[in-house]
């Protein structure tokens, strides 16, 4: 695909502009490092375009400090690009008053509640870019129904781009997505006994 030119022009009845601006579902999966990092890079591009961005972090603990979170939140507050809203399952989600850490809501229930909010936001067209970080895990574990996810994403209104990250992305999601990247590990410092470090892992 040199210079961004597609190798195929489908007979779908769409104009070049319509096809170019079609909202995408992207999936970042595989055993390699960088799935979330790449998704947050797309969120940064969306912010630069002035799009409202919604990040939903499934699975990851509230104790984990993700460098991109602070950077995107600060950028979202500048008023120069789009707004940025960041939700963490590990913090009990931002729209409910229950505390997941106190055992009031199981991880499975919290994942389902996160998905319910994503559905509400998709229906309301709250964001132009949604990052569903580590959302492949709740589907893989059977906490969230993958067939429902595929159906909701397929029928979403407007021009909302959705990025799903995580290992073991279900085949149904992969088949339905427009853009799928498999991050495969070739080599990693942990293989040589080196733990994660600031500026690289967080």
Image (spheres, helix red, strand yellow):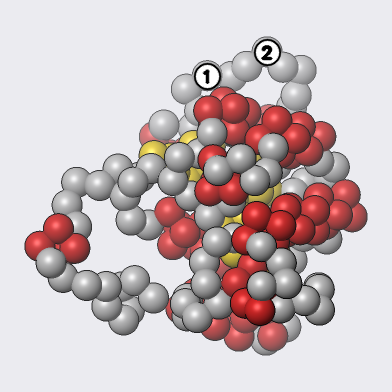
Examine the rendered structure and indicate whether residue 131 appears above or below residue 21.
Answer: below
User: Farthest residue toward the right?
Assistant: 124
Q: Camera-side residue: 144 or 15?
A: 144
Residue ID at (67%, 86%): 78
Measure the alpha-carbon separation of dots 2 and 1.
10 Å
Q: Camera-side residue: 171 or 141?
A: 141
Q: Tell whether 114 sits left or right of 5.
A: right
Label 1 Cα crowd, 10 Å radius (few <14 / some 14-19 / many 20+): few
Residue 61 in the image: state x and y as whole percent: 52, 72
User: Farthest residue toward the top?
Assistant: 11
Secondary element under disc 2, as helix, strand or loop, is: loop
- In the picture, residue 131 is in which quadrant? bottom right
Residue ID at (66%, 35%): 146
Label 2 Cα crowd, 10 Å radius (few <14 / some 14-19 / many 20+): few
Q: Tell whether 51 sits left or right of 43.
A: right
Q: Camera-side residue: 120 or 156?
A: 120
Residue ID at (52%, 19%): 8
Name the residue tied to disc 1.
8
Residue 92 shows in the view: no
Residue 80 in the image: state x and y as whole percent: 68, 80
Name the residue tied to disc 2.
11
Secondary element under disc 1, as helix, strand or loop, is: loop
- Label number found at residue 197: none
Residue 2 in the image: state x and y as whole percent: 39, 34
Q: Tell whether 125 sits left or right of 61.
A: right
- Decide: marks 2, 1 in contact (CB < 8 A)? no
């Amino acid at each position: 695909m040199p210079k961004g030119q597609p190798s195929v022009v489908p007979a779908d009845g769409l104009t070049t502009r319509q096809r170019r601006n079609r909202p995408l579902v992207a999936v970042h999966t595989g055993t390699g490092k960088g799935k979330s990092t790449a998704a947050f890079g797309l969120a940064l591009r969306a912010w630069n375009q002035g799009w409202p961005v919604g990040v939903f972090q499934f699975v990851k603990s509230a104790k984990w400090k993700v460098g991109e979170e602070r950077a995107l939140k600060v950028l979202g507050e500048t008023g120069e690009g789009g707004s940025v809203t960041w939700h963490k399952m590990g913090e009990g989600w931002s729209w409910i008053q229950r505390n997941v850490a106190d055992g009031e809501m199981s991880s499975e229930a919290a994942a389902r509640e996160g998905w319910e909010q994503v559905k509400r936001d998709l229906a309301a067209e709250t964001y132009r870019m949604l990052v569903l970080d580590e959302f492949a895990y709740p589907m893989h574990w059977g906490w969230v129904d993958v067939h429902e996810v595929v159906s909701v994403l397929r029928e979403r209104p407007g021009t909302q781009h959705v990025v799903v990250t995580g290992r073991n992305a279900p085949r149904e999601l992969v088949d339905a997505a427009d853009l799928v990247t498999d991050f495969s590990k070739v080599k990693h410092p942990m293989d040589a006994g080196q733990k994660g470090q600031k500026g690289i892992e967080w």
